[in-house]
Image (spheres, helix red, strand yellow):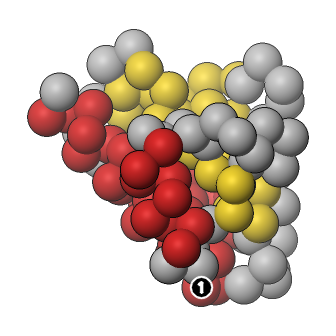
Amino acid sequence: MSMQAGKKIAEAVLAWPEMTQEPHRFGGIEFRCRGKEIGHLHGDALCDIPLSKPMRDAFVAAGMAEPHHIHPDSGWVSVWLRSDRDVANAIEILRRKYHDVMSG
């Protein structure tokens, strides 16, 4: 994977209305919308996204994400950014979370 994974994801996500970026408390950058975290990046290596457990289970079953690398029993998913497909999966999952926040 090129060293541009985080940049590609940030450019896509920050193009959506009402999205902001700020430093994440554990390092990296966090994406927020209407006061809620949509997800965060750990450089070009990893994207973590908070979901409902049914959504988490669906994305894991589809092979688009893994249970969170530290808190696997939470609703969070982790997407390891090893390929262009992983970057696309992260953007798609972030888009789903974004739509939930915008419609909620």
Q: Is residue 54 left or right of residue 29?
A: left
- The C terminus: image quadrant: top left
Point out the residue furthest to the left here.
Answer: 103
Under circle 1, the secondary element is helix
Q: Residue at x 70, y 40 (%)?
A: 73
- The N terminus: image quadrant: bottom right
Q: Residue at x 78, y 37 (%)?
A: 71
Quadrant in the rendering for residue 70: top right
Q: Name the foreground residue: 21 vs 95.
A: 95
The answer to whether any part of residue 81 appears in the image is yes
Q: Name the foreground residue: 99 vs 17.
A: 99
Q: Name the foreground residue: 9 vs 99.
A: 99
Numbered disc total: 1
Instruction: Provide residue 6's location: percent of width, then percent of height.
Output: 69, 58
Q: Is residue 81 left or right of residue 17?
A: right
Could you classify mark 1 by the number of other residues whose Cα lies within 10 Å: few (under 14), some (14-19), or many (20 or more)? few
Determine which residue is flagged by label 1: 85
On screen, 37 above or below 69?
above
On screen, 34 above or below 17?
above
Q: Residue at x 77, y 66 (%)?
A: 80
Q: Name the foreground residue: 22 vs 94.
A: 94
Q: Residue at x 61, y 24 (%)?
A: 22
Mark 1: amino acid: Arg
Instruction: Provide residue 19's location: percent of width, then percent of height.
Output: 37, 34
Instruction: Provide residue 44's location: percent of width, then percent of height.
Output: 80, 60
Q: Is residue 62 left or right of residue 92?
A: right
Instruction: Provide residue 40's location: percent of width, then percent of height.
Output: 64, 39
